[in-house]
Image (cartoon, rainbow, N blue to C red):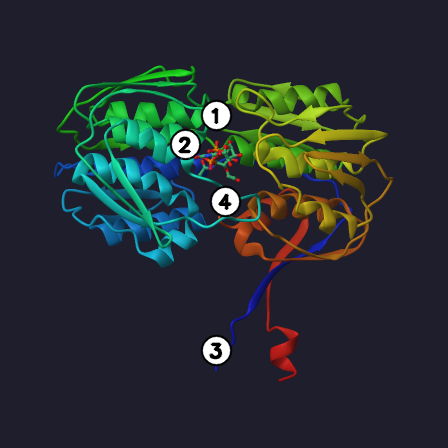
Amino acid sequence: MEWNCVERYQVQGGLPLVGTVKVGGAKNSILPVLAAALLNESREEIRLQQVPALGDVRAMLSILRCLGARVDQEGEDLLLQTADVDCDHVPDALMREMRSSIFLMGPLLGRLGRVRISYPGGCAIGLRPINLHLEGLQQLGAVIEEKGGCIEARGRLRGGEVTLAYPSVGATENLMLAAVCARGSTVINNAACEPEIADLQNFLNMLGARVSGAGSPVIRIRGVRGLHGGSYRVFPDRIVAGTFLLAAVLTRGCVTVEEVIPEHFASLTKLLEEAGAEVERGAAAVTVRAAEPLRALSRVKTGPYPGFPTDLQPQLLAALTLADGSSTIIEHVFKGRFHHVPELRKMGARIELSGHRAVIRGVRRLSGAAVQATDLRAGAALTLAALAADGESTIAGIGHIERGYDGLPEALARLGGRISREKSVPEEVLSS
Ligand code: EPZ
């Protein structure tokens, strides 16, 4: 009988991480790029180079296949044939698995003039509303009905001017994708400026679209028909790069991340220098060395790019649990993105929460514990803390982590960490 095994990371902490790691393609670029591929109605193939093996990528590929795309793999490259895409409905089960499928609305509306998806549920980092997506699509001519947790949108999209109430990354991407094949031109004001937006613009223009302004708050799109295929490689993942640099800090080691774009995570490296770590920047590599505990950081606030990224907040918070003094982090992007805190407390961290604010009083040592990952970046933070803690830790819920990290335990082990992936049959099953 096949029991559904529980997979955990088993970690023996206390060793410094030392060495070099190559960073792969960005999850938060590849997901909107995969959705954008649906706009290619030609028989020309799209080749995406060196795509990381991530849970979220697999989920998005399942959705593309459901919609009628053909997906082949050649080594680390993905080959997409999207000429026969004709389905306008994303199955509920896949919607639940992949929150980011909300930005399939734009390309399916742009290409087919209709789309049906179930309302993406919330997750551990907050409600994840989609009002900015829906309002923006309506301003481009979509007629949207929400009933019983399902969203139906129809209409031949036309260009227009949309001003986002908040520079939402997903809403910016969704509207870019909706506008590419709309009749006329579109301007998106107060657009997100994250590097992933520029990555998406570069990909779309490679397909023959006419997009400009990404990286600034004003993005312009001229509607075109007849996009074609081509080959593209997304930017390196700035959050994965930052995660490895913070692993060096927590374990008082020395790690170099290679094949990166240093300015994409400059907010982190500036903070680490402020806190006393040594940072060396090359053209496509960054090294962080932290032989001593960090100095506490009096006030770190997460925010839209180029501010400090919310996706590195849990990992930085973990590093500050061992800093010299008391630090404050204010999580301004997502309500409730502190689920890593109760788990870090099990390791001996001293953290006080009030609303958006976390006050972290540095301690000298953390102790290994059995902890639970609740979401992707919280799980990464717990993994780093376990590598720094005295003794043994187990981390459950690693499926969350492997949605966004390709081979994390193997990469950390190559840097000298004692970490492995273990399968176990749950206690309750053994005793039944
Ligand atoms: C993207 O999520 C990323 N995901 C997130 O990364 C990242 O944390 C986030 O941008 C912020 O940088 C992908 O790119 C796949 P938002 P997204 O729309 O698009 C509110 C990770 O760990 N909002 O910029 O969902 C929202 O509630 C993930 O890799 C509305 O109110 O983020 C949040 O408070 C986690 N209405 C804020 O805006 C909307 O219609 C930022 O959300 C949309 C968003």
Q: Label 3, on which residue?
A: 2
How dense is the environment of label 2, judged by Cα within 10 Å: few (below 14), some, or many (20 and up)?
many
Q: Amino acid at mark 3?
A: Glu
Does the closest atom of ligand 1 sit within 8 Å of the Cβ of label 1? yes
Query: Would you name the residue on which mark 4 appears?
Result: 404
Helix, strand or loop at label 3? It is loop
Looking at marks 1 and 4 on the same chain, the residue that comes earlier in the sequence is marked by 1
How far is the residue under mark 4 from the one under mark 2?
25 Å
* Percent coordinates x, y for residue 57 in the rendering: 39, 46
Q: Identify which residue, 12 or 268, lies in the foreground.
A: 268
Q: Which residue is mark 2?
A: 132
Cα gap from disc 1 to disc 2, whole angstroms: 8 Å
> Tag 4: residue type?
Gly
Does dot 4 land on a helix, a strand or a loop?
loop
- Mark 4 and ligand 1: say if the CB distance to the nearest ligand atom is below 8 Å: yes
Q: CA–CA distance between discs 3 and 2?
A: 44 Å
